[in-house]
Image: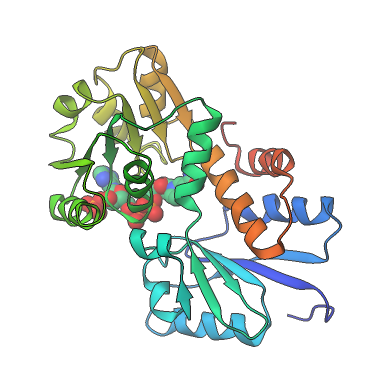
Amino acid sequence: MSEPADKRLVGLIGWPVEHSPSPAMHNAAFEALELDWEYVLLPVEPRKGRLVAAVEELRAMGFAGANVTVPHKESIMDHLDGTSAAARSIGAVNTIRITPAGALMGDNTDYLGFLADLRDHGVDPSGMDALVIGAGGSARAIVHALASSGARRIVILNRTPGRAEGLAESIRGRIRYTILETAPFPDGLTRSIESTRLVVNCTPIGLTDDPADARHFDNIDLGENHVVYDLVYTRATPLLARAARCGATAIAGLGMLVHQGALAFEIWTGLKPPIDLMRSAAVSSSGGQP
Ligand code: NAP
């Protein structure tokens, strides 16, 4: 890659990355603020040695920073020079800042992005009972966000129950006032929904047209008081369709994507991000639900 010497580069490390709206979102913001910056895709296969080589390349090429996505958000932590308290609590990094001396500092803007989007929709998780579906990297950020905002009780449902229990245990050790429970997915779904107000899907269910996806949520008992948040943002998922049919508040995760990106933009440039422009760029590039 040959770039003018003063051009600053940031990028997205993940696999796959080609469908990400992040380049469109960030490059629109750089252009609007007349910054000579570029956001590029950095596909890194999940194979031995690839991640460490990518990290060295970032340093050698003088990148200003990077975002990190599936499947590297947790493993990248072993290759950084420092991490924020939030990233350590969550156990995952989605944003790296590279200092002028070449130190890689990891942070997590996913959890704040989620909370900012809830706020945009007038939802305050403090005192709420919540149900989180999934126990992977994004679920870690969401459970951290809800517990640190004072949620009263969080039930984590996961296909692999041991992973849900591991996540609950890591939060129990740090935040004692939130009650954490776990149950297997999908068996625990019906019972858990009855007693919760906020439902957050942190799995890729709904990303494709797999009919099994729709079946999980076909008959769940949602009502007007439920708020249903789906981290999948590229289409109207069966879960959000069911929520809308039942009169519940249905929120797609595009706002979280935009807010986590805006926070990363600010970490890298030190400037206030043009968030409305970033949102429009993300919507047009992803076909997302605003
Ligand atoms: P991840 O770390 O791979 O975790 C995936 C989770 O989904 C695991 O708990 C897994 O269960 C579960 N799962 C996967 N396929 C399933 C299926 N067919 N049935 C039931 N459970 C299933 O992924 P992630 O990083 O958490 O991302 C999850 C989703 O959130 C992705 O669609 C991603 O694009 C989206 N996301 C959106 C944003 C945003 O800004 N809106 C941010 C981050 C992620 P097991 O433990 O049993 O494998």
Residue 157 x %, y %: 20, 41
Q: How is the image coloured?
A: rainbow
Seen at 41% across and 40% down, the residue is 208
Residue 156 x %, y %: 22, 42
Q: Specify the quadrant that holds the C terminus.
A: top right
- In this orientation, which residue lies closer to the viewer: 129 or 159? 129
Q: Is residue 71 above or below residue 220?
A: below
Q: Quadrant of residue 98?
A: bottom right
Residue 44 x %, y %: 49, 72
Residue 37 visible? The answer is yes
- Left or right of 275 on screen, residue 84: left
- Left or right of 15 on screen, residue 278: right
- In this orientation, which residue lies closer to the viewer: 39 or 119? 119
Seen at 50% across and 25% down, the residue is 122
Which residue occupies the extreme front position in the image? Answer: 177
Q: Quadrant of residue 125?
A: top left
Residue 46 visible? The answer is no
Q: Quadrant of residue 99?
A: bottom right
Q: Is residue 184 above or below residue 170?
A: above
Seen at 67% across and 73% down, the residue is 64
* Count of numbered marks: 0
Q: Is residue 114 above or below residue 128?
A: below
Q: Is residue 253 above or below residue 228?
A: below
- Left or right of 140 on screen, residue 21: right
Q: Specify the quadrant that holds the N terminus.
A: bottom right
- Left or right of 39 on screen, residue 145: left
Residue 255 x %, y %: 56, 38
